[in-house]
Amino acid sequence: MKLRVLGCSGGIGGNLRTTSFLLDRDVLIDAGTGVSELSLAELVAIDHVFVTHSHLDHIAFIPFMVDSVGLMRDRPLTIYASGETLDILRQHIFNWKIWPDFSEIPSVQRPYMRYQMLELGETVVLNERKITSVPANHVVPAVGYHLDSGKASLVFSGDTTTNDALWEVVNKIKNLRYLIIETAFSNSEKELAVLAKHLCPSLLAEELAKLKCDADVYITHMKPGELELTMREIEDCVRGQRPRMLINNQEFEF
């Protein structure tokens, strides 16, 4: 497996782009503004999108992608998510008011896009690659994803706050190599982090203390203008690990 970071910021500006990861050539994990980095040929090659949750910074480019390449493909793009998240996409995005319903275009029999519900903990196997939803704790229904090549694994937390259920799952992964976890706010905004169900450095430190596996930790979803501050605070708060900042176009092979 090869995972390429298309976007990993909590906002935009300059070269910052919101959450999206390209797995090999054919799978997206979330579809924020980072998808704009892909060429038309790369967009056509994507068959699967795994969505963590319905917030705009994670789904904004699904509508544009389907509209741009639907006619060029011979099969529908499959959107995987929890039932709650799929309902939100149907009701509030692909509803003919915000955007056309591409699960009906050009016809119900041959649509450009299809939905596939994922139960929490369910695994999808794509050419021997295993993608499993893992618990997240956010203000809307949300999950993270465990990507397993057979040789090694990567876990992406998605948007989450304090989440014991996640660590129960992660600590059972014998081949865990990488953990990508969010820290959306600095410590001065801890009250906002708690309200919005995100992490700040002090909360991150409490969460990482629950990690029993030996894995490389990368930080995602930091706010523009607070990257250096947040990383300094993480260095001050976290003991026993040395988390690194996730950056655009970084690649993980596992």
Image (cartoon, rainbow, N blue to C red):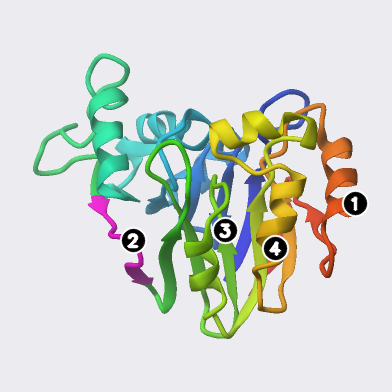
Amino acid carrying mark 4 in the image: Leu
Circle number at residue 120: 2
Amino acid carrying mark 1 in the image: Asp
In the rendered image, residue 96, in percent from the top left (x then y), is placed at 22, 18
Q: Earlier in the sequence, mark 4 or mark 2?
A: 2
Camera-nearest label, 3 or 4: 4
In the rendered image, residue 182, in percent from the top left (x then y), is placed at 65, 48
Label 4 environment density (alpha carbons within 10 Å; few <14, some 14–19, many ≥20): some
Helix, strand or loop at mark 2: loop
Circle number at residue 136: none
Residue where numbered disc 3 is placed: 156
Q: What's the magenta region?
A: 116-125
**Marks 3/2: CA–CA distance:** 14 Å
In the rendered image, residue 30, in percent from the top left (x then y), is placed at 49, 45
As drawn, which residue projects farthest toward the left?
Answer: 109
Give the left or right position of residue 98, taking residue 178 as reference: left
Q: Which of marks 1 and 2 is nearer the N terminus?
A: 2
**Marks 4/2: CA–CA distance:** 22 Å
**Marks 1/4: CA–CA distance:** 14 Å
Camera-nearest label, 1 or 2: 1
- Verify CB contact (< 8 Å) between mark 3 and mark 4: no
Name which residue lies at 61% across and 61% down. 3
Name which residue lies at 23% across and 22% down. 95
- Verify CB contact (< 8 Å) between mark 1 and mark 2: no
Residue where numbered disc 1 is placed: 236
Residue where numbered disc 4 is placed: 208
**Marks 3/4: CA–CA distance:** 14 Å
Q: Which of marks 1 and 3 is nearer the N terminus?
A: 3
Label 3 environment density (alpha carbons within 10 Å; few <14, some 14–19, many ≥20): many
- Is 216 in the magenta? no
